[in-house]
Image (cartoon, helix red, strand yellow):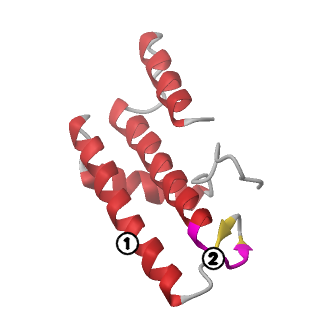
Amino acid sequence: MTHQANWTALFRSVERSEFFASFAETAAECLAREYYHSVERYDRSVCTGRIYAGCIMPATPAESRLINRNATATLRRIEDKGLQLGISAQDLYDARIRLLKAGREMEGFECYTP
């Protein structure tokens, strides 16, 4: 499922009043998943290490620096997007943790195989 499909599904549920979570929680989860997918796509373009638990690993310290710098920039971009929707950085953090704990952060990613 693409990010556009995530947002489309969110707004369809809003139109039909099918609330299983608050708008902020659902939107925060979409943004959190967008963060994980964006970071993993970049990691796969940079890293040459092995794939562990569905995610590619850096093979060198230089790769680690590149992916850490990208992860920080991506998180700032996603947090800014969230603030425009009225979602706090804490709500986004909570959504990221919920996805990680549930093992659902990579659902919908092109290369994901559970």
User: What label sits on residue 53 in the rendered view?
Assistant: none
Q: Which residues are magenta?
A: 46-51
Image spot of residue 75 (x, y percent):
35, 58
Q: Secondary structure at mark 1?
A: helix
Which residue is at 28% across, 51% downward? 79
With 73 as the anchor, is 39 left or right in this view? right
Gap in Å between the C-alphas at discs 2 and 1? 15 Å
Quarter of the image for the N terminus: give it: top right
Look at the picture and state if 38 lies above or below 45: above
In the drawing, does residue 105 fall left or right of residue 23?
right
Residue 77 locus on image (x, y percent): 31, 51
Residue ID for mark 2: 57
**Which residue corresponds to the image point at 45% horizontal and 43% vertical from the top-left?**
29
Label 2 environment density (alpha carbons within 10 Å; few <14, some 14–19, many ≥20): many
Of the pair 102 and 49, the residue shown nearer to us: 49
Q: Quadrant of residue 76?
A: bottom left
Tag 1: residue type?
Arg
Total marks in image: 2
Q: Residue 32, how many percent across, how many down?
A: 44, 50
Residue 65 image position (x, y, % from top left):
43, 81
Magenta: main secondary structure: loop
Quarter residue 52 falls in = bottom right
Q: Is residue 85 magenta?
A: no
Indicate whether residue 49 is drawn in magenta: yes
Residue at 68% x, 79% y: name it. Answer: 49
Q: Is residue 111 left or right of 8 when viewed as pictured?
A: right
Q: Amino acid at mark 2?
A: Met
Query: Where is mark 1, residue-wise?
Result: 69
Q: Secondary structure at mark 2?
A: loop
